[in-house]
Amino acid sequence: MQAKKRYLILFSAGASVILLFCFGGIQVPLPRRGGPGSRRDGRSLGVGAPWRRSHGPLQPFSPWDQVETEDYNGHTSPQQKRESISGVYTGRRCRMDSCFDFSPQCRSSGFKVYVYPPQKGEKMSESYQNIMSSIEGSRFYTSDPAQACLFVLSLDTLDRDQLSPQFIHNLKAKVQALPLWNGGKNHIIFNLYSGTWPDYTEDLGFDIGHAMLAKASISTENFRPNFDVSIPLFSKDHPRTGGERGYMKQNSIPPYRKYMLVFKGKRYLTGIGSDTRNALYHVHNSEDVVLLTTCKHGKDWQKHKDARCDRDNAEYDK
């Protein structure tokens, strides 16, 4: 009996060793070089390959918008995060929280605006002079750039039509040479016209970078919400101030004015803006809504004239 017990114990131990060897210590032979499950260095990635030991703590998870930055820290402040991703965002994706610097001196100064001094030999249109004078005469103006939150160029950017006499040449190099440009951060660019008829593309001839754009007739594709400013297209004769004090002392509904809406301008037969201008006649009633347009725009306007051009031109010239 004692012999049988010894043989039974010996058999159980041997079986246990065999099972451990088969299921715990099996080795998968290395596949051929270049085959499935192999690495370039020849080491196997098969089921039996051992895990590589990490020689340090695991790296923290990086969000999708931080993958192109270095040394991301999940405990950084929002301002530090904006600075860390400044290289990821392009000018087309600018928002106030990513392309505008709310520095402490900016907050404490009361949002001051600095206007660059005029550059010698540079021409400036009357409309742009009015903008500069309005800013310099306001309570937000400062002559100290260290106190400014916003910077305005002294270079006239209102008319970027290459055929215009107000067009400023070599504007790209002149803007880049400004000592405070800083990629356009905390700057605002004013523009009324861009491109050349009949296309009128919105290319200003230089990269505005992180600068805000105050522009007339800006497209929804290029407009950056809560960052850019859409302004009306005004003429050089537009008054700089609001004029004399009004006489209205209480709300009057309906208004006592004879005209509710008045517009007089050119009707683009082709190109950008033609659909909007050509639809104005639907609203025109010759009474309280008067919208007068002329087809006489461009040298070859007669090639594109439609059936309404003669009537529109006659009413426009009255």
Image (cartoon, rainbow, N blue to C red):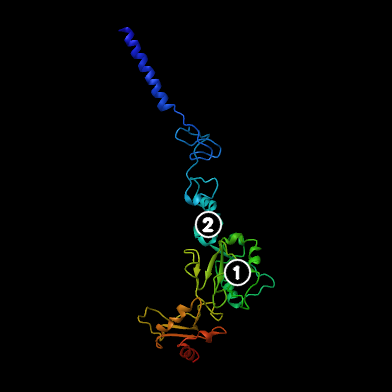
Residue 36, how many percent across, how many down?
A: 48, 40
Residue 44, how many percent across, how many down?
A: 50, 35
Residue 126, how many percent across, how many down?
A: 60, 78
Q: Is mark 1 on a helix, strand or loop?
A: loop
Amino acid type, callout 2: Tyr
Asked if residue 107 shows in the view, the reply is no
Amino acid type, callout 1: Gly
Other-residue count near label 2 (Cα within 10 Å), few / some / many at <14 / 14–19 / ≥20: some
* Up/down of 310 relative to 62, above or below: below
Q: Which mark is residue 89?
A: 2
From the image, tell me which residue sits under label 1.
Answer: 205
Q: Which of 242 and 33 is in front in this view?
A: 33
Marks 1 and 2 sit apart, C-alpha to C-alpha, by 21 Å
Question: Quarter-wise, where is residue 276 in the image?
Answer: bottom left
In primary-sequence order, the first of circles 1 and 2 is: 2
Residue drawn at x 62%, y 65% is 143
Seen as rendered, the residue at the extreme front is 32
